[in-house]
Amino acid sequence: MIFEYKASSPKPFMNENSWTFANGMRGVYNTQPFDYSWFMKMIKSNPEAIGILRAMVTDILSDGVVWKGGKNKILKAKAWAQKKQLWSRKLPAGMLDWFIYGNNLIWTGMDFAKVKEMVYKEINSNKEFKGSMFKDEIANKMISDMSEKALDYRNVPWSTVTIDTDATDVTGFSQNMGTTIANTGISMAGPTGNERKWKANEVIHAVLMDMDGKAYGFSPMVALTSTISTLALIKDYNGYKFDNGGEPDLIFSFPNEIADNPNVKALVRHLEEKRLSRNKGGHLVMTGEVNVTPVSDHNKDMEYRLLAVYYTGIMAFAFNMPIGRIQSILGSEINTGGQELSDSGYWRSISHMQTYWEELLNTHIFEPEFGVSFKFKRSYKQDEVREAQVMQMKATAIGTMISSLRIKPSKNYLKEAFGFDDDDIEWKWYEKLDPEKVAMPASSPKNDGSSQPKNREVMNSDGKNSADDKKKNVMNGRTNVP
């Protein structure tokens, strides 16, 4: 017996603004969480934020994609993506909205379920196709032809979007191009505005972070609002200071002179001449008493520079970006210790984001439309594997050399011969290294003690006191003797 099971307990409410009618019915009204238009203007005026956002989008997309599916189907999917500029323009633009607002809305112009329903309705009403054993194949071909012509990919500007909900679910999305009430984010549709409405299954909604049961996604960039606005104020403050220049550096006073005194006039004339950069320097000889009072104790470094550096670091931290990626902005004030751990955490975050977009686009577009799927290439993982393989090869070569020669090479030799840096490996193993206990390679004859003395003198880290000068020279790289 086939039956449909429905949840016996009620759905939880969404955490959106609501009211309850006298009859117990619950109503919901939604507005944008804040003034999106003002927020976007603030982001556009902040180069630090734009740099961080662009770097993350590039890290997600720059390695390209790999496809899975039939050859002809893959060719169709690649041709469609290229025609729509999916990888070069549409997806990067959508990801910027995704990072800034925590939301991205994609309009494809297609409702696959509706298209499928229309096609099967047409086939079942046609006597020629209704009883055919190839009905499903015919339907799939018709669906593919129809959707391929109609399928589109457009990012809906999120600053114009409002999410429609009932008490428990998202029911649709509204785009309003009318006027916006200042500082409220509430868009008013009027005679001068245009409005579009879509059901929830007619568009694709990408969410960066779900938080507190809200219909709207959340972004760390929203939490950085005060940080970004303060950075703008710091720049404005210094810009206005340079522009206005109203504060003098020094005050010259002549306690024993009158205003028309030749000494006063000579100093005024001299200061006016020295305002020009080409007249800087030189000397001035005067008679009489002159008092000089400093007024502007201006530091040569930009004021609030450390605060700006600190705030920029906060912005990077909010997105797990390693400080080393923005070192050119931070300067020498920030220590990038623990960079390897920071890099690892950042690339895990990037990988998680890539997986999210793979699932979103595959399930909504590429699998139902083209019968294929894609995955973003992850070259950073390939780099890690490649580095690990190289390190393993170097370690094997060192073990073979030590077991064959039965001497301990100097650190300097290992660095020069194998390209090691102090940061590449930990040297604890070196201090504990005993050449007599290193296993012989499988291809080498077993050392029974007859060919080499057991108490061979071991070379120290300076390459001194070796019992064999020839081997000593080899270890220190001073000869080409094998």
Image: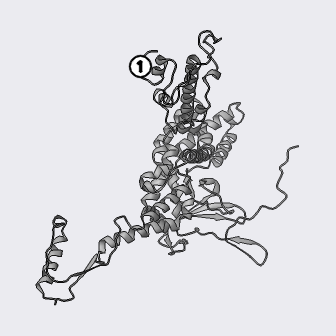
Tally of marks: 1
**SS for dot 1:** loop
Amino acid type of the residue that numbered disc 1 sits on in the rendered structure: Thr
Give the answer, above or below, for where 108 lies relative to 479: below
Residue drawn at x 48%, y 21% is 472
Left or right, 285 with respect to 391, comes to left
Q: Position of residue 462 (x, y in %)?
A: 48, 30
Residue drawn at x 71%, y 30% is 133
Q: Position of residue 466 (x, y in %)?
A: 51, 22
Q: Position of residue 261 (x, y in %)?
A: 12, 87
Residue drawn at x 35%, y 69% is 239
Left or right, 365 with respect to 290, comes to right
When asked about the image quadrant of residue 389, the answer is top right
Nearest the eye: 46 or 298: 298
Residue drawn at x 54%, y 41% is 148
Q: Position of residue 25 (x, y in %)?
A: 76, 72
Nearest the eye: 424 or 24: 424
For the residue carrying disc 1, how many other residues have a C-alpha within 10 Å: few (<14), some (14-19), or many (20+)? few
Nearest the eye: 465 or 106: 465
Give the answer, above or below, for where 195 lies relative to 55: below
Left or right, 366 with respect to 212, comes to left
* Residue, disc 1: 479
Quadrant for the N terminus, please.
top right
Give the answer, above or below, for where 338 lies relative to 249: above
Q: How is the image coloured?
A: one colour
